[in-house]
């Protein structure tokens, strides 16, 4: 059976878990805590980041790389659109999640409010977090509100890597005690609820809420 390495609470590990679940792939989950993982782990994840994946003697780091691999080994159900432009747009939304939302809602809200105080003995600077929520978050949410418009999914009228990459970041936003204001961003708020209620997301979110409550 393949192995997924990483810890609950990581938006990137969650991307891989959702993709594995959507594709019905059974796997073992081996706990790896980032920021100074066992040096052995760097053999499969040279940057020391989570997640990584082992499939027999094949190993891969990085959520985007892992999911692209799963798409080739387990094509059904497809998580990438077949139309070339839709495909590229789906990759763009994945990047918007990884490289646009994560550095703000993950690194500047979830991390200082949840991980710092809980695991690193670093009290949260609430004034700094509030400033991020007021200045850096709104343009990101405005963009998504406009992109979602009246669509159920971001691209190609079906669930794709675009939805995985964006919606995973909103789980961390929730774990940090934040929510999308439905008066200001009604389409985004409904979209996030819709994607988070899919069985693949719901199952991992329930586990994470339980883990972070403990
Ligand atoms: N591009 C990577 C990003 C992974 C990532 O940044 N993971 C974080 C945890 S959420 C990590 O391992 N950070 C540890 C570090 O930067 O040393 C992916 O998509 O897997």
Image (cartoon, helix red, strand yellow):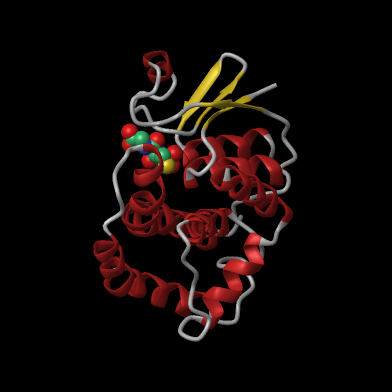
**Residue 68's x, y, as percent?**
54, 40
The residue at 41%/25% (across/down) is: 45
The residue at 35%/69% (across/down) is: 137
**Residue 129's x, y, as percent?**
30, 63
Q: Give whichever of 126, 171 is nearer the camera.
A: 126
Q: Is residue 119 above or below residue 123?
A: above
Q: Where is ligand 1, by quadrant?
A: top left
Image-based side of 120 in relation to 156, left or right: left
**Residue 100's x, y, as percent?**
35, 58
**Residue 125's x, y, as percent?**
26, 57
Q: Give whichever of 85, 118 is nearer the camera.
A: 118
Count of all numbered marks drawn on residues in the image: 0
Q: Is residue 18 above or below residue 60?
A: below
Dividing the picture into quarters, in which one does residue 76 lie? top right
Q: Is residue 94 above or below residue 18?
A: below
The residue at 40%/31% (across/down) is: 34
Image-based side of 186 in relation to 194, left or right: left
For the N terminus, the image quarter is top right
For the C terminus, the image quarter is top right
The residue furthest bottom is 183
Q: Is residue 89 above or below residue 182?
A: above
């Amino acid at each position: 059976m393949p192995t997924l390495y990483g810890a609950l609470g990581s938006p990137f590990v969650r991307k891989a878990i959702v993709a594995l679940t959507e594709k019905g792939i059974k796997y073992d989950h081996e706990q790896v805590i980032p920021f100074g993982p066992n040096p052995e782990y760097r053999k499969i994840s040279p940057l020391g980041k989570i997640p990584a994946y082992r499939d027999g003697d094949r190993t891969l780091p990085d959520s985007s790389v892992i999911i692209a691999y799963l798409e080739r080994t387990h094509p059904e159900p497809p998580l990438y659109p077949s139309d070339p432009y839709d495909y590229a747009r789906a990759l763009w939304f994945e990047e918007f999640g990884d490289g646009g939302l994560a550095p703000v809602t993950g690194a500047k809200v979830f991390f200082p409010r949840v991980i710092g105080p809980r695991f690193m003995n670093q009290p949260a600077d609430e004034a700094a977090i509030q400033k991020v929520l007021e200045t850096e978050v709104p343009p990101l949410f405005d963009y998504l509100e406009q992109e979602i418009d009246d669509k159920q999914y971001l691209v190609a009228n079906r669930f794709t890597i675009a939805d995985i990459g964006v919606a995973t970041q909103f789980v961390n936003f929730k774990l940090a005690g934040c929510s999308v204001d439905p008066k200001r961003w009604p389409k985004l708020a409904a979209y996030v609820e819709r994607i988070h209620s899919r069985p693949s997301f719901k199952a991992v979110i329930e586990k994470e809420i339980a883990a972070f409550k403990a």
